Image: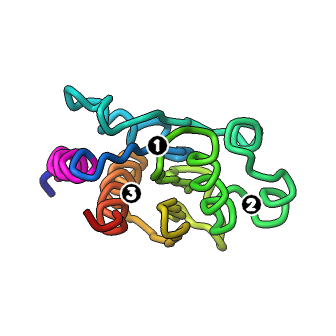
Amino acid sequence: MADTTPALVAQLARELKARGLMMATAESCTGGLIAGACTEVSGSSEWFERGFVTYSNAAKHELLGVPKALIEQHGAVSEPVARAMAAGAVAHSPAQLAVAVTGVAGPTGGSPDKPVGTVWFGWATPAGVFTEHQRFDGDRSAVRQATVRHALAGLLQRLPAA
């Protein structure tokens, strides 16, 4: 499969600049790959505000304000945590939009309830926070790259009208 990430980033850059909007990322399983893909583009400071790499539960709480009880009750890889991460990225930055990802990239860490490849996404927009669950096949790298592409495509789909 060809890597469509650069094309997604280019489209997202055009759309964000056209709307005068800034985005932030809140990443766990991707470890900054979404922010890295965005900042690979020269001039990305016009539309990319900041990235939070919140790999540990403590980082999710300290940097994004995800309640500890939420993580304890639902686990880090869950809809409520993805929602709180996305909302926290907007609340803790001047960005108007954010994408958050939390998942199990593997090869270890999976469980019957949350097998390897399980990823929860959160997108914070002026219209609210939207979440989605996906399960990606492949090794750690494939899961992480698929997560990056889905996160960017999801943000594109949820942009406010120009």
**Where does the image place residue 139, in percent across and percent down from the top left?**
39, 52
Report which residue position mark 3 lands on.
Answer: 151
- Residue that appears at 47% across and 33% down: 50
Mark before the other along the chain sequence, 1 or 3: 1
**Where does the image place residue 48, in percent across and percent down from the top left?**
36, 37
Q: Quadrant of residue 84?
A: bottom right
Label 2 and label 1: CA atoms lie apart by 23 Å
Three-letter residue code for mark 1? Ala
Q: Is residue 14 left or right of residue 44?
A: left
Q: Is residue 133 left or right of residue 42?
A: right
**Where does the image place residue 38, in percent across and percent down from the top left?**
30, 38
Q: How many callouts does the rendering have?
A: 3
Tag on residue 105? none
Neighbours of disc 3 within 10 Å: few (<14), some (14-19), many (20+): many
Three-letter residue code for mark 2? Gly
Three-letter residue code for mark 3? Ala
- Residue that appears at 48% across and 43% down: 95
Residues in magenta?
3-16
Report which residue position mark 2 lands on.
Answer: 75
Q: SS of the residue at dot 2? A: loop
Tag on residue 24? 1
Mark before the other along the chain sequence, 3 or 2: 2
Q: Is residue 155 magenta?
A: no
Q: Is residue 12 magenta?
A: yes
Q: Are marks 2 and 1 in contact (CB under 8 Å)?
A: no
